[in-house]
Amino acid sequence: MKILLPVDGSDCSLRAVDHLIAHVGWFRDVPEIHLLHVQAPIPIGRVQAHVGKETLHAYYLEEGQAHLLAAQKKLDAAGRFHTTHIHVGQPAEVIATMADEFGCDLVAMGSHGRGGMAGLVMGSVASRVLHLASCPVLLVK
């Protein structure tokens, strides 16, 4: 069983980590956990004229690691081995693509719980993942 666990450092995404840890007994075998953070890209434009590719890469890496830290600590404390991944792009699209690439059986992620108009106006990564993912998606509120 391969599980993709996308996190953004929010309390909501950390609840998904807690939920997975608490319910790992649901799975017959110990799951292979892929912890993922997707960093939204900085609009390139004139930025590249002033910031080198290496600096931009270092920024994405540093930001990604900061957002993964709390989830990593929770998984480590629970004795759950995981592999971490940091990607840059549109979150829902990257999550669905990575789930396919890793051959995941499940995406477990937090849902910010925005409903109605807020969800329509702001969009929802979780609802977009539901539409794009080719495997089941577990949303934790």
Image (spheres, helix red, strand yellow):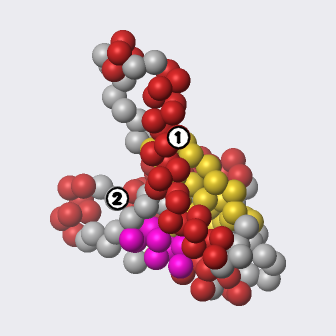
How far apart are labels 2 and 1 at the CA level?
24 Å
Chain part drawn in magenta: 11-18
The quarter of the displayed image where residue 83 is located: bottom right
Q: Which residue is mark 1?
A: 61
Taking the image as shown, residue 91 lies to the left or right of residue 98, namely left
- Quadrant (top left, top right, bottom left, bottom right) of the C terminus: bottom left
Main SS, magenta residues: helix
Crowding at label 1, few (<14), some or many (≥20) Cα neighbours within 10 Å? Answer: some
SS at badge 2: loop
Q: Nearer the viewer, residue 47 or 45?
A: 47
What residue is shown at x 45% (from left), y 35% (from top)? 59
Residue 120 screen position, x and y as percent: 24, 59
Taking the image as shown, residue 128 lies to the left or right of residue 30, namely left
Tag 2 and tag 1, C-beta contact below 8 Å:
no
Q: Amino acid at mark 2?
A: Ser
Residue 70 screen position, x and y as percent: 50, 65
Q: Nearer the viewer, residue 60 or 38?
A: 60
Residue 8 part of the magenta-drawn span: no
Crowding at label 2, few (<14), some or many (≥20) Cα neighbours within 10 Å? Answer: some
Taking the image as shown, residue 9 lies to the left or right of residue 77, namely left
Q: What label sits on residue 124 in the rendered view?
A: 2
Q: Amino acid at mark 1?
A: Leu
Residue 6 screen position, x and y as percent: 53, 59
Q: Is residue 51 above or below residue 97?
A: above
Q: Indicate which disc, 2 or 1, sits on the residue closer to the N terminus.
A: 1
Residue 19 screen position, x and y as percent: 54, 81
What residue is shown at x 79% (from left), y 83% (from top)? 28
